Amino acid sequence: MTLNDDKLILFCSIIDFGKGSKALKLAKKIGALGGTIFLGKGTVKNEILNILGVLDIRKEIFITIIDEELEDVFYDEMANKFKLDHLNRGIAFSIPLKSFLKANEEKYIVNTEKKGVKDVDYEAIFIIVDKGLSDDVLEVAEEAGSKGGTVIHGRGSGSEEKEKLFNIEIEPEKDIILILSKVEESAKIVKSIKKLLDICKPGAGIVFTLDVNKTLGLYE
């Protein structure tokens, strides 16, 4: 299937560990041209699990690029396959893409049309910080109104000075935190994170937000 160059959507789903490959298989069947799976962890709100010392659970973050016309179909199929329309079974959201470079092609697609959200009052907040700071970020975010988040581990390469281990340069590891928040609460959450990280200092971290087209699996 060929994607419609003018209307592209980044579809993202956060599901239980081990289900990412099933989501990828389903996406290809529906019409996506592939996908990527990241490992992450989600915060646990169940008091019994907290008492048992289970403070986080492994998650898989599945992302793919699809035609906007397939957006509703993807939500229906993901809901049917993974029961995302049930509480605590996972979440999905989609973001309009402004540009996209296809693999193995020289064509660079730019969507100049401004797309509005479909009656969705959520935004995606991304925070990139040094490894080990994610718990503090999630804590202040929840105090500001967040209902939780997902942490993905990565590596950064922006620092001029790198630490050395046995005389080998080591790039600092990073935590990438994803929070879906109500639009009216996003500013307060970002302000709290900014204060915690002192984000204006070089190397302190990066915070940015993206509009969300549609969501599934989010409950008050």
Image (tube, rainbow, N blue to C red):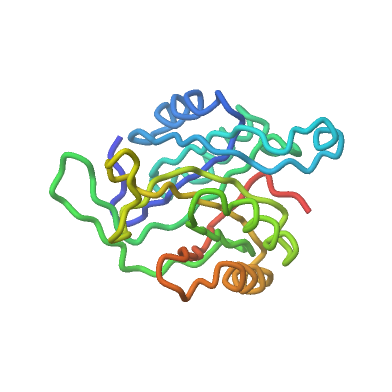
Quadrant where the N terminus is found in the figure: top left
| The furthest residue to the left | 106
- Judged left or right of residue 83, residue 98 is left
Across and down, in percent, residue 148 comes to 69, 51
Q: Nearer the viewer, residue 67 or 210?
A: 210
| The furthest residue to the front | 166
The correct choice, above or below, for 53 with respect to 123 in the image is: above
The correct choice, above or below, for 61 with respect to 128 in the image is: above
Q: Nearer the viewer, residue 180 or 129?
A: 129
Q: Residue at x 67, y 64 (%)?
A: 182
Q: Residue at x 34, y 41 (%)?
A: 165
Quadrant where the C terminus is found in the figure: bottom right
Q: Nearer the viewer, residue 12 or 8?
A: 12
Across and down, in percent, residue 147 comes to 72, 54
The correct choice, above or below, for 188 with respect to 69 in the image is: below
Label count reads: 0
- Judged left or right of residue 114, residue 112 is left
Q: Residue at x 72, y 59 (%)?
A: 142
Q: Nearer the viewer, residue 186 or 71?
A: 186
For residue 179, which quarter of the picture?
bottom right
Across and down, in percent, residue 122 comes to 62, 61
Q: Residue at x 75, y 49 (%)?
A: 219
- Judged left or right of residue 76, residue 101 is left
